């Protein structure tokens, strides 16, 4: 199976569009900084998109009076960029959209609910109508003129990877000709406090795979890929091909991952099998690498099981963007595509020492002309484990 | 051509085993909100002595609004306690994939696990995913479920939005075993799942399928009188249609659903 990737679009703490993101990745410049989007008693660094929702509306040419959740605005921005990049006309019913989100319109619901709690007749209804996960997807479809099959996936932090997978499977089954796939999530008080209550937010910048790692930094953003059926690729020169994927479950704990990385092992092996690749053919792995003690230990154990002694160069880009939850699999898929295109191994920022784990991520930017296959991991609450493989 | 069969259909209102049997871990049960508890119990009740959880190759769930009780509780605590000393449990359980994940966890099932949350198309997306999986010979039995439960605050908000002027609220959990193999338990064949571009009138479907002249075929058209209206109500309709199928009086059922005049879907069921 080879599913061509013909367009990419991204918005993250590193900027709007592929160029801004790529420049920051090359320069080793993090997007993680102090929280400015909303008031919070928690003084933790975050990976904010550096534009207010009002400014995003302006950039997108949307009416300022109309209500859009930040999740929708981020999603519209990235999906529109991906479609422009692909040069794809969306009027056909054979162009679909599979989007992922975990917070939906929670940023607006939070405002509504404060007023509603004090008096049930209060709170602006337009701030709660975008609460569900489908809202951002429908707003993207409307803005981009997508008329084909549209759906929303919500499997926590593996969501966007699963959206990419479903889109690819619909193309394989000839149910669609083109599909826009990825995810979007905005920072909000709900998730910030949720991860805080779990005590897995680092009060400093996160350090994935470092022995002193003390948790994750939250981020926000959106990213989409445009995929098409292989027969239709014709004149478009695709970036690369999606060749492997797998979705498995760790079945260990609702939030923690198993010490032997069972779910991650199964998803990486499943994706390799689907792509008919040997482990030694993988040139780079963009790991999930949140920076929590538990995730990195579990993912590390899985890397050792799948790749034994010869683990390919790997790094987490979450010290650049923060953990963007349902968008992470999309943003990191775009980074995987760019890794193949430009022969780049991204640095795992803030990494100093592996300690006993002996898992040493790529710590400085490296150029390589030998990257033919890139693997991208995304794991989430509920044991959801997903792996994608992109190939030249 | 691959055929698809519905080999089990379970509804949260008619569970034959008690919650402690279906969810043996008391601590787990205590942490669960009503939606999660009923969803997990309904899903788990598809497994019994002659159909073990090991035989399931994928778990796919659908929910329009997710675990509202947990989301509301965490959001309320966060506002009322000014972000301090929050209990993480409602946050943990608030993710949309909680029911599917907990079923996977309870039966140690490492297979494909997916959750759709696309308003009136959540359940149909899950069903479509199951069909795509069954086209691959590695997959034989797929557990597909839909779960939506109301909370008082949501009912109030939707009342203010004017929802209950035309519809009445509803809720429930429904799980189905969709399989590529016909067994002694097979209730019906899932012959088609279609997504019309726009709402279709009842008269047009009646004429198209000739259901007035042909007593062996029946049309279920947005029959929400007993179910109420909610994003995954089409799962309740499918359950009702399958009960009709079990009576062996009709050969074909055409099941038409749409949620508030959007997301039309058409399912064709054939008798066995």
Image (cartoon, coloured by chain):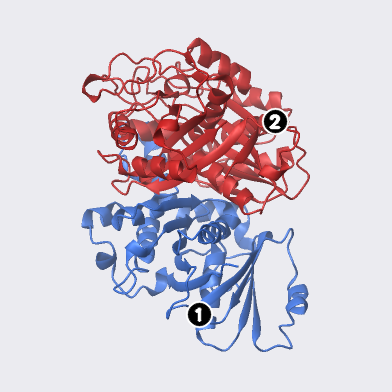
Label 1 is found on which chain of the structure?
A: B
Against B154, residue A291 (above or below) is above
Q: Which of marks 1 and 2 is in front?
A: 2
* Residue B50 left/right relative to A130: left
Residue A383 has which mark? none
Q: Could you tell me residue B123's position as x and y percent? A: 54, 59
Question: In the image, what residue occupies the spot 63% across and 22% down?
Answer: A17
Pick the quarter of the image with the N terminus of chain A. top right
Pick the quarter of the image with the C terminus of chain A. top right
The chain in blue? B
As drawn, which residue projects farthest toward the top? A27
Distance between mark 1 and mark 2 Cα atoms? 52 Å
Number of numbered labels in the structure image: 2
Q: Could you tell me residue B8's position as x and y percent? A: 44, 73
Residue B228 sits in quarter: bottom right
Mark 2 lies on a secondary structure that is loop
Question: In the image, what residue occupies the spot 57% across and 51% down?
Answer: B118
Q: Could you tell me residue A261's position as x and y percent? A: 30, 39
Residue under label 2: A237
Label 2 is found on which chain of the structure?
A: A
Colour displayed for chain A in the image of the structure: red
Q: Which of A136 and A87 is in front in this view?
A: A87
Question: In the image, what residue occupies the spot 32% across and 49% down?
Answer: A251
Whether residue A140 is visible to the viewer of this picture, yes or no, is: yes
Q: How crowded is mark 2: few (under 14 residues within 10 Å), some or many (20 or more)?
A: few
Q: Residues within 10 Å of mark 1 (few under 14, many from 20)?
A: some
Question: In the image, what residue occupies the spot 33% across and 27% down?
Answer: A310
Residue B243 has which mark? 1
Whether residue B33 is visible to the viewer of this picture, yes or no, is: no
Q: Which of B29 and A263 is in front in this view?
A: A263
Against B173, residue A286 (above or below) is above
């Amino acid at each position: 199976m080879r599913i061509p990737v013909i367009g990419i679009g991204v918005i993250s703490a590193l900027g709007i569009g592929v160029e801004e993101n790529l420049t920051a990745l090359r320069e080793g410049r993090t997007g993680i900084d102090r929280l400015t989007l909303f008031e919070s008693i928690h003084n933790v660094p975050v990976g904010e998109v550096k534009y207010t929702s009002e400014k995003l509306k302006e950039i997108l040419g949307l009416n300022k009076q109309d209500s859009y959740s930040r999740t929708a605005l981020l999603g519209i921005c990235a999906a529109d960029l991906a479609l422009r990049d692909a040069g794809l006309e969306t009027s056909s019913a054979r162009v679909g959209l599979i989007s992922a989100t975990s917070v939906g319109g929670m940023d607006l619901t939070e405002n509504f609910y404060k007023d509603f709690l004090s008096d049930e007749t209060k709170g602006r209804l337009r701030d709660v109508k975008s609460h569900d996960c489908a809202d951002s997807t429908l707003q993207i479809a409307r803005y981009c003129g997508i008329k084909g099959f549209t759906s929303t996936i919500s499997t926590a932090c593996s969501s966007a990877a699963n959206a990419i997978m479903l889109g690819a499977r619909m193309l394989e089954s000839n149910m669609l000709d083109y599909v826009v796939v990825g995810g979007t999530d905005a920072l909000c008080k709900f998730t910030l406090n949720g991860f805080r209550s779990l005590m897995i937010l680092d009060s400093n910048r996160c350090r994935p795979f470092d022995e002193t790692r003390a948790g994750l930094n939250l981020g926000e953003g959106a990213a989409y890929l445009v995929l098409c059926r292989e027969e239709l690729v014709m004149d478009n020169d695709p970036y690369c091909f999606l060749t492997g994927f797998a979705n498995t479950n760790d079945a260990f704990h609702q939030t923690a991952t198993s010490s032997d990385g069972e779910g991650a092992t199964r998803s990486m092996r499943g994706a390799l099998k689907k792509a008919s690749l040997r482990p030694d053919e993988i040139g780079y792995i963009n790991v999930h690498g949140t920076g929590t003690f538990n995730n990195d230990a579990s993912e590390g154990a899985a890397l050792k099981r799948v790749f034994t002694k010869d683990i390919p160069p790997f790094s987490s880009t979450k010290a650049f963007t923060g953990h963007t939850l349902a968008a992470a699999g999309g943003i990191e898929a775009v980074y995987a595509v760019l890794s193949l295109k430009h022969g780049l191994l991204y640095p795992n920022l803030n990494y100093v020492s592996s300690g006993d784990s002996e898992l040493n991520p790529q710590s400085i930017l490296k150029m390589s002309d030998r990257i033919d296959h890139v693997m991208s991991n995304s794991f989430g609450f509920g044991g959801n484990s997903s792996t994608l493989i992109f190939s030249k | 051509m691959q055929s698809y069969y519905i080999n089990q259909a379970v509804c949260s209102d008619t569970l034959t085993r008690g919650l402690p049997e279906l969810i043996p871990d008391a601590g787990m049960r205590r942490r669960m909100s009503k939606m999660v508890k009923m969803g997990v119990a309904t899903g788990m009740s598809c497994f019994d002595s002659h159909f073990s959880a090991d035989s399931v190759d994928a778990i796919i769930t659908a929910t329009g609004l997710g675990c509202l009780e947990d989301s509301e509780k965490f959001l309320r605590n966060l506002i009322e306690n000014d972000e301090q000393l929050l209990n993480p449990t409602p946050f943990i359980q608030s993710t949309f994939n909680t029911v599917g994940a907990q079923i996977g966890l309870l039966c140690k099932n490492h297979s494909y696990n997916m959750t759709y949350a696309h308003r009136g198309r959540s359940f149909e997306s899950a069903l479509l995913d199951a069909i795509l999986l069954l086209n691959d010979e590695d997959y034989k039995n797929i557990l597909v479920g839909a779960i939506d439960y109301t909370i008082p605050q949501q009912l109030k908000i939707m009342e203010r939005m004017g929802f209950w002027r035309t519809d009445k609220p509803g809720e429930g959990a429904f799980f189905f075993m969709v399989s590529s193999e016909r067994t002694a338990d097979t209730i019906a064949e899932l012959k088609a799942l279609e997504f019309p571009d726009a709402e279709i009138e009842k008269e047009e479907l009646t004429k198209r399928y000739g259901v007035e002249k042909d007593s062996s075929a029946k049309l279920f058209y947005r029959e929400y009188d007993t179910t109420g209206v909610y994003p995954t109500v089409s799962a309740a309709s499918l359950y009702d249609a399958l009960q009709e199928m079990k009576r062996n009086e009709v050969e074909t059922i055409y099941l038409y659903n749409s949620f508030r005049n959007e997301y039309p879907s058409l399912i064709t069921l054939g008798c066995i």
